[in-house]
Amino acid sequence: MRVDLRRLRPAERFTALGGVVLLTALFLPWYAPAVAKVELERGVFSIGRSVPDAAEKLGLNQQVVPTFTAWQQLELLDLLLVLVALAALGLAVLVIAQRSPAPVAVGEVLLTTLATVAAFAVLYRIVDQPGDDRALDVRYAAWLGFLATAAIARGAWRALRDEGVDRTVEPSVVDHT
């Protein structure tokens, strides 16, 4: 089997890049506590702002602020996101390895569907955080995860649309006469 990276079209490269970004985003902070409770001499003092703002206002060390990754907060959605990310990377491998377009087209259809469902599920978890909505703030990685999942869906859909393009002939060699 001969590996030819030129077989990857821009849409499939975009999809694979989305898979790498999504896998990375799963390990970054998706949520942080929204309410800081600081114990003072007279009891518990609550500030209705985010923890970093409260810590800064009270002169506390901001490095002790807990954050939660997708692995810690998303029960089954994290497994779906890993599946989508690995499928995005697997699509690139399939395109490089396959001579026939049929398995690639099936993979693109499945990935488009799976990534679209996952993107809506991530968006739902951004709007409606796990547990009490007032208890958690959404962090940058949740948005990065949503954008990566949407990019995977878009890239797989675009690759499916371009499926009729011949992967074996260089565009500069094609005779348009």
Image (cartoon, rainbow, N blue to C red):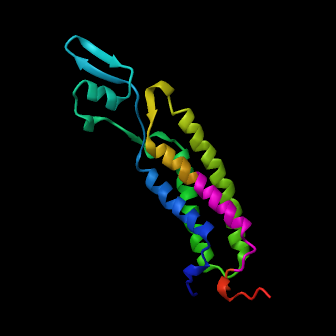
Q: In this view, does 19 lie above or below 145?
A: below
In the image, what residue occupies the spot 71% across and 62% down?
109
Q: In this view, does 61 lie above or below 110?
A: above
Q: In which quarter of the image is residue 137?
A: top left
Q: In this view, does 158 lie above or below 29?
A: below
Q: In which quarter of the image is residue 2?
A: bottom right
- Residue 132 in the image: state x and y as whole percent: 49, 26
In the image, what residue occupies the spot 70% across and 72% down?
103
Q: Majority secondary structure of the magenta segment?
A: helix
- Residue 48 in the image: state x and y as whole percent: 39, 20
In the image, what residue occupies the spot 65% across and 62% down?
156
Task: Please identify the quadrant where the N terminus is shown.
Answer: bottom right
Q: In which quarter of the image is residue 122?
A: top right
Nearest the eye: 48 or 39:
48
Task: Count how many numbered circles sit on residues in the image.
Answer: 0
In the image, what residue occupies the spot 32% across and 22% down?
37
Membership of 4 in magenta stretch: no
Q: What stretch is highlighted in magenta?
A: 150-166
* Lateral position of residue 23 relative to residue 175, left or right: left
* Lateral position of residue 124 relative to residue 25, left or right: right
Q: Evaluate whether residue 36 shows in this view.
A: yes
